[in-house]
């Protein structure tokens, strides 16, 4: 019979080597209550029936007393290794049972054949128009993969997401033949103010020949590029019809965001500097403003300008993440779309996230909620000092919010959950 996990403990992989660019090793870390002064750390490899050669360490954070310790796990010849940890303070069992996630082995991805639009439409009974250069049609048929794009200049921006979708389809579904259309750009329909677009417009056969993006003049319309209508993207406008979100490519670049699982270093919240910190490249445009239509330039440019007073704010040209975790409040401002990897490490930073009103959504935004996981700031930052003072006066509520963010991080970035989400995505576009 399974035991129970330890209450109020976060155990995250702290350090191990990755192998090659975009390769991954999927590691699960579980705690198991033994006595009021001891517990097990269980480290398991999920993506292969094998151990690991890396010198794995686990950073343990005790939420109750806001202390941390680094536990050496080392390499392993088998896919699971258990280490006993003894402490000199009391711990308690959680009501959550220890459940080991099932392992998996993704099917090998075959080569991808690049074919013409005419061939794609014929082979998949599709009716694709000439797609903008940022968009790709990808089809799976009898175990082989086929792709159409105008010139493949942006393929590197979406390659990992495409491969992920295909591997999930090959490994976990029974689809013998299907196709999807996916955008390589950060967000679908960039360069437009967000609006409830619910009027379909059929785009002409060659209207987007040699053009990079979908462009719509009528703010109520959305483009019909093929009869199935759906467009997949790494981020989408909140009110855009027939769009569906997929995990961002940086998730794969950063080895399933495993390196971010211990960025927080276990720094106690009460020891952090009581200031708001922001650092980010000058990305985005005026179209990211959710309400203001009178401001030229991006939200980030506006925030850095004299229009926003910097009382209680640290705003540098570049501040490393390893320094930002020592501030109680970390500001998140959209770039070209959502902030992707910045969102990931901020969720697990142990600091309170200040997030501006956003026109964008990612695949987990139904669960990522203002006043539950983050403090929402107006798009022109006019209430940022008011929200800062509220946090300063409510440290216990801030700690609850931080714990919710850590729990959300563990849930949404677990690869098995992302694979399950992708399976549901495939079901939706193949209805």
Image: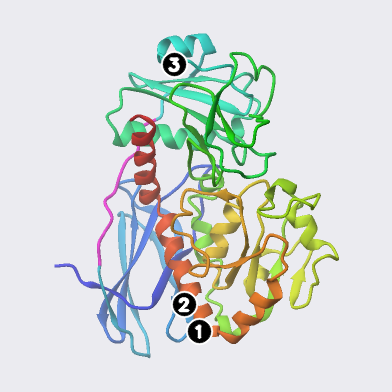
Answer whether labels 3 and 2 touch (C-beta < 8 Å). Answer: no
In this orientation, which residue lies closer to the viewer: 165 or 218?
A: 218
Q: Which residue is mark 1?
A: 396
Q: Is residue 156 visible?
A: yes
Q: Quadrant of the N terminus?
A: bottom left
Q: Residue furthest bottom?
A: 89
Check the picture and name the quadrant holding the C terminus.
top left
Cα separation, mark 1 vs mark 3, equals 55 Å
Query: Circle 3 sits on which residue?
Result: 126
Mark 1 vs mark 3: which is more N-terminal?
3
Look at 62% across and 18% down and name the residue there: 150
Where is residue 250 shown, x and y percent of the image? 56, 47
Residue 211 x %, y %: 69, 23
**Marks 3 and 2, Cα distance to the nearest angstrom?**
50 Å
Question: Which residue appears at 68% of the width and 40% of the height?
Answer: 192
Q: Which residues are magenta?
A: 98-108
- Please say which color scheme the image uses: rainbow
Q: State the residue in front, 323 or 396.
A: 396
Is residue 305 rendered to the left or right of residue 28?
right
Asked whether 132 falls inside the magenta stretch, the response is no
Q: Secondary structure at mark 1?
A: helix
Q: Is residue 28 above or below residue 203?
A: below
Identify the element where label 2 is drawn.
helix
* Residues packed near mark 3 inside 10 Å, few (<14), some (14 to 19) or many (20 plus): some
What percent of the width, then of the height, locates residue 215?
66, 30
Task: Give the Cα distance between marks 2 and 1.
Answer: 6 Å
Q: Is residue 18 left or right of residue 417?
A: right
Q: Nearer the viewer, residue 128 or 124?
A: 128
Which residue position holds label 2?
A: 400
């Amino acid at each position: 019979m399974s035991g129970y996990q330890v209450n109020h403990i976060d155990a995250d992989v702290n350090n191990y080597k990755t192998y090659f660019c975009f390769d991954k090793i999927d590691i699960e870390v579980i705690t198991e209550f033994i006595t009021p002064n001891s517990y097990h750390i269980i480290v398991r490899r999920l993506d292969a029936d094998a151990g690991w050669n890396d010198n794995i360490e686990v950073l343990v954070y005790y939420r109750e007393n806001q202390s941390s310790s680094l536990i050496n796990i080392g390499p392993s010849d088998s896919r699971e290794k258990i280490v006993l940890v003894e402490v000199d303070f009391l711990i308690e069992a959680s009501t959550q049972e220890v459940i080991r996630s099932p392992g998996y082995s993704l099917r090998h991805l075959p080569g991808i054949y690049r074919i013409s639009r005419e061939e794609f439409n014929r082979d998949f009974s599709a009716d694709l128009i000439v797609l903008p250069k940022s968009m790709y049609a990808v089809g799976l048929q009898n175990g082989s993969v086929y792709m159409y794009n105008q010139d493949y200049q942006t393929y590197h921006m979406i390659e990992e997401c495409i491969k992920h979708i295909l591997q999930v389809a090959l490994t976990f579904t029974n689809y013998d033949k299907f196709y999807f259309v996916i955008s390589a750009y950060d967000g679908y329909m960039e360069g437009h103010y967000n609006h409830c677009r619910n009027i379909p417009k059929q785009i002409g056969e060659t209207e987007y020949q040699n053009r990079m993006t979908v462009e719509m003049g009528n703010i109520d319309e959305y483009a019909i590029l093929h009869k199935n209508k759906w467009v997949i993207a790494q981020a989408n406008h909140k009110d855009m019809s027939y769009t569906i979100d997929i995990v961002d490519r940086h998730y794969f670049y950063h080895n399933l965001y495993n390196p971010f699982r211990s960025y927080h270093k276990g720094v106690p919240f009460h020891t952090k500097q009581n200031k708001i910190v922001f650092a980010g490249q000058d990305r985005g445009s005026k179209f990211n403003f959710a309400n203001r239509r009178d401001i030229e330039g991006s939200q980030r440019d506006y925030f850095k300008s004299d229009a926003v007073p910097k009382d209680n704010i640290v705003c540098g040209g570049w501040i490393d993440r390893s320094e930002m975790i020592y501030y109680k409040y970390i500001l998140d401002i959209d770039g070209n779309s959502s902030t992707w990897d910045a969102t990931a490490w901020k969720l697990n930073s142990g600091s309170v996230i200040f997030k501006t009103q956003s026109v964008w959504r990612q695949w987990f935004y139904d669960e990522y909620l203002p006043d539950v996981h983050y403090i929402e700031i107006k798009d022109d930052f006019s209430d940022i000092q008011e929200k800062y003072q509220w946090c300063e006066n409510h440290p216990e509520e801030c700690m609850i919010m931080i714990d919710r963010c850590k729990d959300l991080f563990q849930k949404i970035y677990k690869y098995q959950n992302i694979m399950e989400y992708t399976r549901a995505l495939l079901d939706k576009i193949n209805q």
